Image (cartoon, grey):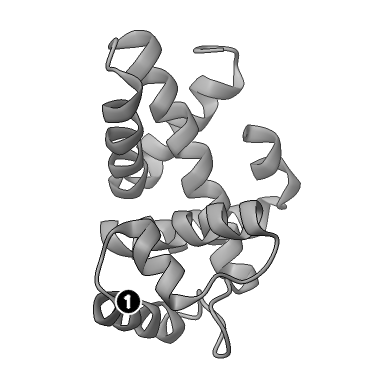
Amino acid sequence: MADEIAQIGGEEQAAAERSCADVTTGEARYLMALLDMQRKGGGDPSQASLARHLKVSAPTALEMLRRLRTLGLVADEGVRLTPAGTSAALVLSSRRRAALAIMQEVLGIDPEHAELEAAWLAASASPLLGRHLISWRAHGAGG
């Protein structure tokens, strides 16, 4: 949540927000998925498991991983976030949680659709909207 964002310093948070602004919606989806998978599985996911998780083909996942490596967000070896990738993914995930609360609690969207919409909103939000989403959630709105 917002406390995860607070764990990264002001300068690092600004860099993470900049990197969020510099990634496409698709790249952001991969960063959030990698963070989710690393948290759940405890280790580095495989390219195949990432592709299954995102419901894309293996070649599509490979191409995106190459792009994320070029951006310095995924390590050169394995399928693992770099520190910059982790920071960006934490910011994106905090945005997603706030967007999910809005989707379900404010707009009344059913959980399955709310999850998808929240991921897209978090991935495509501007830095300004992203900060407001996180702030809204941190100040007790939506739970």
Question: In the rendered image, which residue does mark 1 sit on?
Answer: 64
Element class at badge 1: helix
User: Circle 1: is it few (<14), some (14-19), or many (20+) Cα within 10 Å?
Assistant: some
| Residue 127 vertical placement versus 66 (above, below) | above
Q: Quadrant of the N terminus?
A: top right
Task: Specify the quadrant of the image occupied by residue 65.
Answer: bottom left
Report the front residue among 129 and 62. Answer: 62
Residue 131 visible in the snapshot:
no
Q: Quadrant of the C terminus?
A: top right
Residue 13 visible in the snapshot:
yes
Picture coordinates of residue 51 (x, y %)? 35, 68
Left or right: where 69 falls relative to 121: right
Q: Residue at x 54, y 67 (%)?
A: 85
Report the front residue among 87 and 109. Answer: 109
| Residue 42 vertical placement versus 44 (above, below) | above
Q: Residue at x 46, y 38 (%)?
A: 95
Picture coordinates of residue 123 (x, y %)? 34, 49
| Residue 37 vertical placement versus 61 (above, below) | above
| Residue 104 vertical placement versus 72 (above, below) | above
Picture coordinates of residue 93 (x, y %)? 50, 44
Q: Residue at x 75, y 46 (%)?
A: 7
